[in-house]
Image (tube, rainbow, N blue to C red):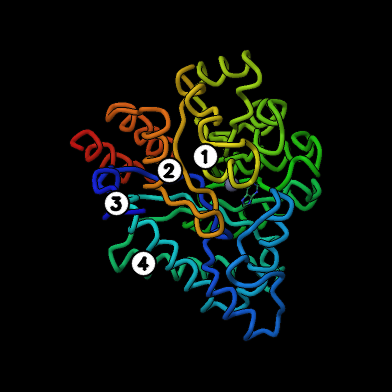
Amino acid sequence: MTSTTHPRLHALPKAEVHLHLEGCFEAATIAQWAQAEGVALPRPQEDLFRFAGLADFLAFLDLACGLACTPQRLFDLSYGLSQRLADNGTGYADVIFNPTHWHAWQGRLAAMIDAMDAGFRAAEQDGLPQVGLCVSLLRTQTAAQAIELVDTLRALRHPRVRALSVDGNEATAGRTGPRFADAFKRAADAGLRRTVHAGESSGPEGVWDAINLLGADRIDHGVRAVEDAVLVQVLADCGIPLGICPTSNVVLGVYPSIAAHPIETLRAAGVRVSLNTDDPALLGASLVGEYALCRETFGWNDEDIRAVARTSIEASFADADTKADLLRALQAW
Ligand code: ADE
Ligand code: ZN
């Protein structure tokens, strides 16, 4: 669902701020690489992207990412992600990647980032959108592993890397805000921004911890904040934006339908929300499609859509010039 189906939404100047490189594998690519590596797939190719919830989904990421074992494959995935951005008229994206899923690259973070950076750089040189990277911890890692990742990033100072992130399953990991507080503080001291998955597999308590313990500049999902009226008011007052992914939340079972999704309740309460795809290839989402879905389901008019797109740009970790250009184009949309 892109330029041909919704030309006006394709033309909408916008950023994407919650998008995982892990979620950008095509089924045919996985099948081809699995065959080359002699790895058995868990299901036939046509059913490959049927997931029984978040835990099943995260286990699949280990399999898919494990196949990306050469610099060329990481280059191809990164370039393909940029092409997907252009197909949706996206002007800039913050892309999350979590090193724990990419088994062939353990202990070689610098080489891994270089291979992705080469793909994004080639895409930018071909006129495709700009990308920043958010390097993610997994919720089940230890405090020591978190500090180690931050120290590696501090030593690397790679210009492509904008932020520290944490993702994974809070339902299996339990309350881990306190465990990661030191790592997030160190990241902030080193000039890195902070984005935190919370309020997807955790309730409002995960969102409180993201704000109070991890100093989140942005919250990925955050939707279950809606269960706590005080928290909704705090989010509206402090303006911390939520990077919301409606289709992902329905496919992975957080809500039974788009109609039951709380994005409209949060938006109406004054919370800053953006629309995103999370893991577009694996979950069957596109950014233009998410805007179209919300317009149809919640009756958003052009000004509602413009406000959500404005939040996406303001909430992004793009440089000041890129943001200003996108905001100017959005005003003229
Ligand atoms: N990693 C990739 N997608 C994710 C999601 N929706 N929640 C947590 N971790 C993820
Ligand atoms: Zn996510």
Q: Residue at x 26, y 55 (%)?
A: 4
Q: Amino acid at mark 1?
A: Pro
Q: Of the two numbered discs 1 and 3 on the same chain, state the one appearing first in sequence.
A: 3
Specify few, some or many for label 1: CA neighbours under 10 Å numbering under 14, 14-19, or 20 or more.
many
Determine contact: label 2, label 4, CB under 8 Å. no
Q: Left or right: where does residue 66 sit relative to residue 331?
A: right
Q: Amino acid at mark 3?
A: Thr
Specify few, some or many for label 2: CA neighbours under 10 Å numbering under 14, 14-19, or 20 or more.
many
Q: Left or right: where does residue 296 sit relative to residue 157?
A: left
Say which of 171 and 109 sits in front: 171
Q: Which residue is mark 2?
A: 290
Dot 2 falls on a residue whose secondary structure is: helix
Q: Nearer the viewer, mark 2 or mark 4?
A: 2
Total tally of numbered discs in the picture: 4
Q: Amino acid at mark 4?
A: Ala
Dot 1 falls on a residue whose secondary structure is: helix
Q: Of the two numbered discs 3 and 2 on the same chain, state the one appearing first in sequence.
A: 3
Q: Which residue is mark 3?
A: 5
Dot 4 falls on a residue whose secondary structure is: helix
Mark 4 CB in 8 Å range of ligand 1?
Answer: no
Mark 1 CB in 8 Å range of ligand 1?
Answer: no
Specify few, some or many for label 3: CA neighbours under 10 Å numbering under 14, 14-19, or 20 or more.
few
Give the percent coordinates (x, y) of residue 327. Answer: 28, 37
Spatial separation of the CA atoms under disc 3 and disc 2: 13 Å
Q: Which residue is mark 4?
A: 123
| Placement of 205 over or under 27, stated as above or below | above
Q: Does the rendering let one see residue 69?
A: yes
Disc assigned to residue 246: 1
Q: Amino acid at mark 2?
A: Glu
Q: Of the two numbered discs 2 and 4 on the same chain, state the one appearing first in sequence.
A: 4
Determine contact: label 3, label 2, CB under 8 Å. no
